Each structure stands twice: as C-alpha cells, then as structure tokens.
Amino acid sequence: MPTLKKIVLASGNAGKIREIAELFSELEIEIAAQGDLGIESPEETGKTFVENALLKARYAADMSGLPAVADDSGISVDALGGLPGVRSARYAGENASDDENLDLLLREMADVPDDDRGAGFHCAAVIAFPGDEVDPVVAEGVWRGRILHQRVGDGGFGYDPIFLDEAAGKTGAQMSREEKNAVSHRGKAFAELKRKLGERIVSAER
C-alpha cells in the first residue's frame, strides 16, 4: 500500500474540487488539482457512476504517477426513470452550463405533482494508484430529497438550488458547506472512502 503524502484530484469542476479538498482537509496529505499538473479529464464513457469515477482516477494516476481521487456523481429523478443519471453534467448538451441543465430539468418536471418529485443524488468516490499493482478503493453514497418547482438559495452548484433535503428543510444551495458535507451523497461517499482507505493502510502495516 503506497504512502499517501500527495494525491491528485481528478476533476475540472471547481465546485467539486472545493468540496473534496474540504472533505480531506483533516488528513495530512498534499492535494493538487489535475489541472495544475496539466492533466485534462478523459471522456466519460462509463455506464455507471463507479465506471466513470474509476476511468477518471486511473487516468489521472497514470498521467501523474501519483494516487488520484475522483468521483462521479449526478442526480436521478424518480419521475424521469432515473434521468439525468450519469449524464447529469451534460443533460442539456455536451458543453451545457449548470443553469442550462437545471432549466431543462425544471421544464421536464413542470407538470409533475409534489408527491412524485422524489430524487436522489448519487456519488461514487474512488482512489486509484499508478499501474496495476494496487487495487482501487471504491465507495458510494446517496442523498435523497425532492425536486422543487424553482430555484431556492444561491450557494452550492449544479442542481443544488432545486434539490430539497426534507429533513433539513433546505435546498443544497441554502446549506453551508459543513451542513451539506454531513448529509450529501459526496460527504457520505468520501467518509466511506476514507474509512476503507484507513482499513487498507492498517492491514498493509500488519
């Protein structure tokens, strides 16, 4: 098991980079964004969140020679049969903005009654290592809520402004980063990832 002194965040999404860096902030690990190392994201051709996360992490690890952390996440809406799913970031087109994706989802949900607006954010988080000698560490998390009819809040990113956490009574865009990390799909996935990584390190030291 390699010593984790420096890792690469395999993402070009500024919002994700901030959240992931914060989730790893208590660990004594130097963190570099892949863009700072001149690494671009590969094409996401996976059919699941786990497949895409592994694809991105393995690419960044092999390009940098360092362990790489990646996540793939998106929102699955019950009334739309699980869409946008793995295409959440590209729902309105390959180069769509957050606002364009969000507007399309709101239009498609316009006539859906409140009782049928359930949805879940899903996240697969992985750490991959250069080469094939060490298996990746994989974890997943889900955050259930409901799609609103309009934006509420001005924080977060992506679909946060229309995703209501009913237990908290807030959208993802109304939550502080600490509140969101405690309940979100990404917070859950990375907590599980760190737990599994810790077990792997302890096992390797025995």
Image (cartoon, rainbow, N blue to C red):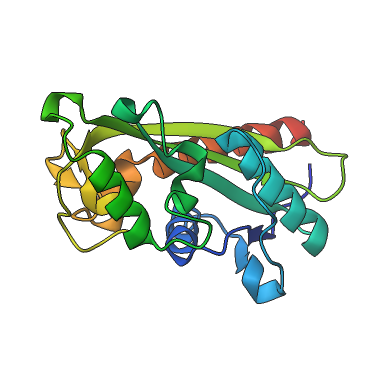
Give the image location of residue 58, x and y in percent. Answer: 75, 48
| Residue 113: quarter of image | top left
Measured as percent of width and height from the top left, residue 102 is found at 31, 53
Q: Residue at x 32, y 43 (%)?
A: 182
Image-based side of 111 in relation to 92, left or right: left
Where, quadrant-wise, is the C terminus in this rendering? top right
- Residue 48 vs residue 23, the one in the foreground: 48
Residue 124 drawn at (x, y percent): 54, 38
The reply to whether residue 157 is in sight is no
Q: Is residue 93 visible to us here? A: yes
Residue at image point 23% right, 53% down:
161
Near-viewer residue (89 or 14): 89
Q: Quadrant of the N terminus?
A: top right
Q: Quadrant of residue 75?
A: top left
Residue at figure coordinates x 49%, y 62% from the top left? 17
Quadrant of the image occupied by residue 148: top left
**Foreground: 75 or 33?**
75
189 versus 8 height, above or below: above
- Residue drawn at (24%, 33%), measured in percent from left and top? 145
| 104 or 203: nearer the viewer | 104
Does residue 51 sit above or below 128 in this rendering? above
